[in-house]
């Protein structure tokens, strides 16, 4: 059985010292080991941004895709080989700006992919512009007088789109983050995990201290029921989207690939099985 070190490779991350992304990489490696995966049974697909480098930093299959397109690639991989555990990862700009169309449709499709958004509330790789997750009034080179747009609320949006697994964590809370990623991997369907991941170089507002002061852990909420979509939506709105933990999970809905008519184990799902279109239609 694979251990943590089997998911490590010799590639040295070139993130800035102190970047939240380091802990997310560590949490993915720990979660993969504790979920009982093998490196050859895991694929990590990423988009563009500082976070996009993560697919090269974990010893598993890696695919560094183009901007905002990690999810189409991840969904294709899962459909081609259902044996594979597929993780997609990228930043808030990648997933919630250029990639948002894919994000919403992957959520409502409920395909069995774990999507980890490394949310630093800014564009880091391009040296600090306002992102869809930046707060109103947020000043950067692209909004020198402060952003006049509202920040996107991705978890509320996911709930509205029919998500079956919605979670949030903080890169500093390695224990919680690892446990959530492991649960996301085990969840049969699409898992959205938004992770607050401070950009220490360009975001001087949403710092480690700022997150520590503003996060509300759902363990603090009495009688919280993560199977209750209305409660999840209400508590998210009450906390300004700062809730952490597994906020919502529906274990009853089937995943997309389990509902595709004719998509049988003995058919296209098995690698190296070549069948004709006629044969496929008869499945
Ligand atoms: Fe991390 Fe920001 Fe540096 Fe990018 S620019 S590696 S997000 S700290
Ligand atoms: Mg970002």
Image (spheres, helix red, strand yellow):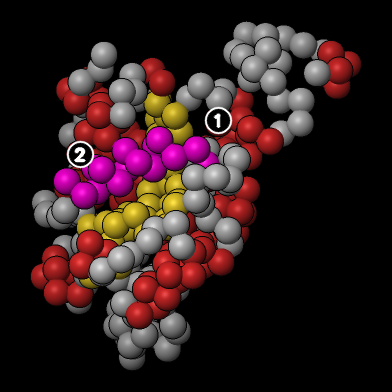
Q: Nearer the viewer, residue 283 or 278?
A: 283
Does 122 sit above or below residue 125? below
Q: Secondary structure at mark 2?
A: helix
Q: Nearer the viewer, residue 277 or 82?
A: 82
- Quarter of the figure that contains the N terminus: top left
Q: Is residue 271 left or right of residue 127?
A: right
The secondary structure making up most of the magenta span is helix
Please give the name of the residue rendered at 16% of the width and 63% of the height, measured from the top-left corner.
Answer: 200
Q: List the residue tagged with mark 2.
A: 26
Magenta stretch containing residue 168, yes or no?
no
Relative image position of residue 246 (x, y in whole percent):
34, 54
Q: Secondary structure at mark 1?
A: helix
Q: Quadrant of residue 187?
A: top left
Q: CA distance from mark 2 to mark 1?
A: 23 Å
Q: Quadrant of residue 224?
A: bottom left
Please give the name of the residue rendered at 55% of the width and 25% of the height, measured from the top-left corner.
Answer: 82
Q: List the residue tagged with mark 1.
A: 77
Relative image position of residue 57 (x, y in whole percent):
27, 34
Query: What span is colored magenta in the figure?
Result: 175-189
- Quarter of the figure that contains the C terminus: top right
Magenta stretch containing residue 180, yes or no?
yes
Please give the name of the residue rendered at 42% of the width and 88% of the height, measured from the top-left corner.
Answer: 148
């Amino acid at each position: 059985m694979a251990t943590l070190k089997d998911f490590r490779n010799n590639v040295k991350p070139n993130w800035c010292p102190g970047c939240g992304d380091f802990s997310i990489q560590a949490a993915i490696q720990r979660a993969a080991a504790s979920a009982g995966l093998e490196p050859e049974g895991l694929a990590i697909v990423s988009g563009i941004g500082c976070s996009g480098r993560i697919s090269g930093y974990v010893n598993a299959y890696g695919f560094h895709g183009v901007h905002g397109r990690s999810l189409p690639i991840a969904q294709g991989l899962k459909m081609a080989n259902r044996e594979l555990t597929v993780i997609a990862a990228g930043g808030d700009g990648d997933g919630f700006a250029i990639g948002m169309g894919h994000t919403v449709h992957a959520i409502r499709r409920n395909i069995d992919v774990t999507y980890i958004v490394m949310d630093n509330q800014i564009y880091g790789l391009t040296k600090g512009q306002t992102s869809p997750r930046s707060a109103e009034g947020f000043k950067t080179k692209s909004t020198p007088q402060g952003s006049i747009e509202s920040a996107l609320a991705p978890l509320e949006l996911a709930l509205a789109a029919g998500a079956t697994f919605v979670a949030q964590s903080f890169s500093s809370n390695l224990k919680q983050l690892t446990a959530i990623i492991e649960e996301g991997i085990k969840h049969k369907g699409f898992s959205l995990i938004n992770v607050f991941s401070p950009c220490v170089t360009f975001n001087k507002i949403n710092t480690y201290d700022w997150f520590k002061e503003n996060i509300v852990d759902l363990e603090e909420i009495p009688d919280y029921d993560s199977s209750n979509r209305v409660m999840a939506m209400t508590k998210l709105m009450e906390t300004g989207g700062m809730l952490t933990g597994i906020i919502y999970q529906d274990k009853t809905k089937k995943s997309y690939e389990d509902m595709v008519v004719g998509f049988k184990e003995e058919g296209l799902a098995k690698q190296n099985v070549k069948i004709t279109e006629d044969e496929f239609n008869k499945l």
